[in-house]
Amino acid sequence: MIDDTVLVVGAGPVGILNALGLARAGIPVTVLDRADDVVMAPRAAVYHWAVLEGLDRLGVYEKAAARGFLKQDYEYRAHRTGERVRFGLEPLDGIVARPYNLHLGQGDLVRLALEELAAHDSATVLWQHTVVGVAQDESGVTVAVDAPGGRRELRAGWLIGADGAHSAVRRALGIEFEGFTWPERFVATNVRYPFQQHGFAQTSFVCDDVYGAVIAKLDESPGGGLWRYTYCEDVALPEEAILDRMPGFFAAVLPDLDGFELVEHAPYRMHQRCATRFRDGRVLLAGDAAHVTNPAGGLGLTGGLFDTFVLQEALAAVIRGEADGSVLDAYARERRRVFLEMVNPAATAIKKMIFHSSDPQQLERDMAGLRRLATDREALIERLMVTKAMETKSLIGAW
């Protein structure tokens, strides 16, 4: 019998953490990924306070906190006026267990989760396995892959598609990915620069329709540490000339470029899309394979982690006979609702504020709202609790 086995497609944080949760529950799991190793290019790096409890339940929080760092401060800057508004997560002290965000590169989180996964004999990770077909019947799922030894088929009782916005699993099932693609290109860079010496918070948002940026500290290494600087440009501009245009974006925002070092960069498109269904029989979608949003507010990975925390628990319960398949329907229904009603509109509003501040009156309204957060403790607490509202509670009662 293979009904108790799970295939996970995608070795990003959503895929690996789903696999880890299943392995910890005693479920045999195999992860497939088309890459030959963990992708370390600049990607998500900030984990909102609301997801830290879930990382702790999966046994990775302590290592993640040790490899990254915890922070509480935010700053918003109106580029054209020079106004700065700063506030932090301190009002959550005494209200929540972990009143801070975690900063850690996405690839680093995956690597430490892989270390934990390696302790489970029932877990396997297969690199260089590209999914080319998915078929299912009443008893399981068959996945065709192109692997180093040629094409092969793998069989399992269940399949989790966590293989990103261009999900081969979702496409193989013919599930539509409704929404739109933004007419801009994001450019994520990892840089070394003494941001804090120049008055930047550990997370800073520069609001401007040309030079808008999200700046976040990644580590505490000597020499000012590594920072993520993400800006936006017209997608019609030639991608091969990004490095020629890049200095102009930095020079417009930073007081000087002394000590500036570009470590790496990665351009990518931004989308607001959602799969029409998150479950198809024995196949479940999670993370960017199910829904994708622009990363301006860090809500894409937040939503994917909230998918993970509830899915791996629910699927393990179904496999062990502790719950029936209706909990997986509930997962699919609820996580889709949260994205459409909460994550998608919130992320869209954040992107517009940071990268499309061309209307002075709208910018003033936005800054007025931020000023209130800096002076009204209760308003700030209400704002900070929004990410917690994006969580789905356990579908089977308790951990």
Image (spheres, grey):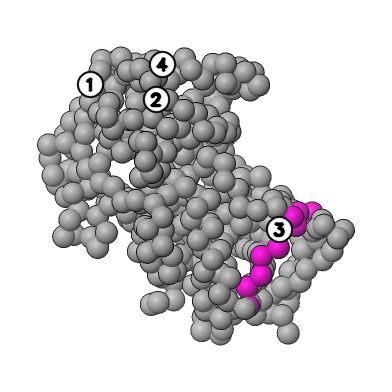
Q: Which circle's residue, 1 or 3, is located before the other in the chain?
A: 1
Q: Which residue is mark 4?
A: 251
Q: Which circle's residue, 2 or 1, is located before the other in the chain?
A: 1
Give me the residue at 46% from left, 39% from top. 295
Q: Which residue is mark 3?
A: 127
Asked if residue 296 lies left or right of residue 176, the reply is left
Of residue 252 and residue 359, the one placed in the foreground of this image is 252
Q: Which mark is residue 259?
A: 2
> Does the magenta-highlighted stretch encompass residue 123?
yes
Looking at the picture, which amino acid does disc 2 mark?
Gly
- The Cα–Cα distance between marks 3 and 4, rounded to whole angstroms, is 41 Å
Looking at the picture, which amino acid does disc 4 mark?
Ala
Q: Which circle's residue, 1 or 4, is located before the other in the chain?
A: 1
Asked if residue 167 lies left or right of residue 264, the reply is right
- The Cα–Cα distance between marks 1 and 3, rounded to whole angstroms, is 48 Å
Looking at the picture, which amino acid does disc 1 mark?
Glu
Residue 141 locus on image (x, y percent):
74, 69
Asked if residue 35 lies left or right of residue 102, the reply is right
